Amino acid sequence: MTGLMQQFVNLFAALLLLLAFAMLAQRRILSLIHLYTLQGVVLVAATAVMGYATRQPHLYVSAGMTLALKVLLIPWLLHRVINRLNVRWDIEMLINVPTTLIAGIVLVIFAFYLAAPIADLAASIARGTLGIALACVLLSFMMMITRSKAVPQVIGFLAMENGLFFAATAATYGMPMVVELGIALDVLVGILILGVFLFQIREQFDSLDIRHLEKLKDD
Amino acid sequence: MSALGLASQALEIVAALAAAPLLLGWVGQCRAWLQNRTAPGLLQPYRVLHKLFNKDSVLAANASPLFRTAPYVIFGCMTLACGIVPTLSTDLPLSPAADAIALVGLFALARVFAALAAMDVGTAFGSLGARREMLVGFLAEPALLMVFFTAALISNSTSLTSIVRTLSAQEIGIQPSLALAAVALIMVALAENARVPVDNPATHLELTMVHEALILEYSGRHLALIEWAAALKLFAYACIGMALFAPWGVAHAQSPAALLTAAPVLVAKLAATGFLLALLETLSAKMRIFRVPEFLGMAFMLAVIAMLVRLLLGAGAQ
């Protein structure tokens, strides 16, 4: 039974990694939001399976919270934002996707190398997946670095939080409830503030290109 | 080396030679059905081969001997490739001759000869096709190697017969690494066999063609051999996919009865693979040639992730 559960957790972990790469290579903002929603769904499934396997009811609670927040509320907010900003069909020119993907592979190897000694010590059923969670965090980091538009950067930030959440679940069967609630609230408030921020950027510069922010004063 | 081993080896090569055009015809048929067209008949590839073999071969005045030998080399490579991949039995005397890595090398050898022959006559289309073929090849080969390495990591061997033996003996479970590798292999197979997202096998439009541009100068029996080799290549890729990801039903025991039961299983699996290929081709649109590196980069990345996931999760899963 645990063997099957472990296989499921491994499968979901691999899916998360795949989705992180898909987000790295995705040009369309709308598809990015869909991918983010999908990542949330996989995260919910992974958390629920882990809760079932370890008989830890509070994991169900955090799975439910993830479902409400990351699958329903935040994607809905993002859809609203891109509709209001009228960037729904925006396509971003990325620099050389294959190079980005190869850099991503290097990051994954680095993350796996870092996580391997920790995984040897851990006893949880998801010990192998810590490396994948770390890789997801790093890949989302890279997504934020390579993007020049504001909305994809916000999505990168949210995906990074997904990775962190998965890391916490994989390593220690989730954080204490208070911490988890706090983080959920943080993310929610963060996305609201970023939403306001996006409108401000747009109002100031007539575009969502982050490069405009590099100039500190008018000249 | 037993007599039965030799027999199964011979049977496998003959089956590949005979069934490869049929697979091509089946894919064409499924494609036609899915696109609401009237299909050109299951045996059409045989008719084409028959027609081409009966025609005279026209050679350009400045064609070198390389141009004439290339079709035979390509055909030989593909036949050997079909002989190595275990489809009916894992008791193959040829299999120690080449492992999975050498198989990739065989494909590469055929590709190099095709590209050299295309440039030999000196027409613009030939060199254009050769260049594009190499563009596809240099990205597809590492991805294919990585797919093989993933399977080799699981079975601790690069020999295809022992990979099939180990994989089919394994209890059925969810293996994320194999699933990722399967997707990568499908992408590589689409690119290598000049199927729709990368190349359109049914077109002679100058701007898009890769495979057709390569063989534009060939006619008669040379063209027949090359077309047959292309069918064999598709057959070999289908068999590689089945060997790595659906290895059940291949005969292990040294008995004629096992061989007999393996044959219908093979036919069923080939039919399913052909239908899947037609479905994929119908659902996707031809992409610009400059997007191909991206497509294959994705395949390479998937294969590498498959290997890494196997390395990280493998110890825990077993």
Image: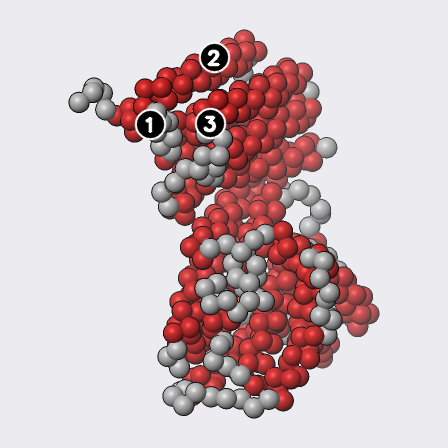
- Helix, strand or loop for disc 1: helix
Residue A177 picture quarter = top right
Asked if one can make out residue A109 in the rendered structure from this viewpoint, the answer is no
Residue B220 location (% of width, % of height): 56, 86
Is residue B141 left or right of B275 when viewed as pictured? left
Looking at the rendered image, the quarter that the C terminus of chain B falls into is top right
Residue underneath mark 1 = A210
Q: Secondary structure at mark 3?
A: loop
C-alpha gap between disc 1 and disc 3? 17 Å
Q: Which quarter of the rendering shows the N terminus of chain B?
A: bottom right
Q: Chain of mark 3?
A: A
> Disc 1 is attached to a residue of which chain?
A
- Write down the residue under mark 3: A86
Q: Chain letter of disc 2?
A: A
Disc 2 versus disc 3: nearer the observer: 3
Q: Are marks 1 and 3 on the same chain?
A: yes
Q: Amino acid at mark 3?
A: Asn
Residue A96 horizontal side relative to residue B285, left or right? left
In the image, what residue type sits under mark 1?
Answer: Ile
Amino acid tagged 2: Val
Query: Which residue does the numbered mark 2 point to in the structure image?
Result: A189
Q: How many marks?
A: 3
- Residue B238 at least partly seen: yes
Nearest the viewer among B259 and B116 is B116
Work out how far the residue at label 2 is from the one at label 3, CA to CA, in angstroms.
23 Å
Q: Label 3: few (<14), some or many (≥20) within 10 Å?
A: few
Q: Is residue B134 above or below residue A193?
A: below
Residue lying furthest left: A219
Query: Between disc 2 and disc 1, whose residue precedes?
Result: 2
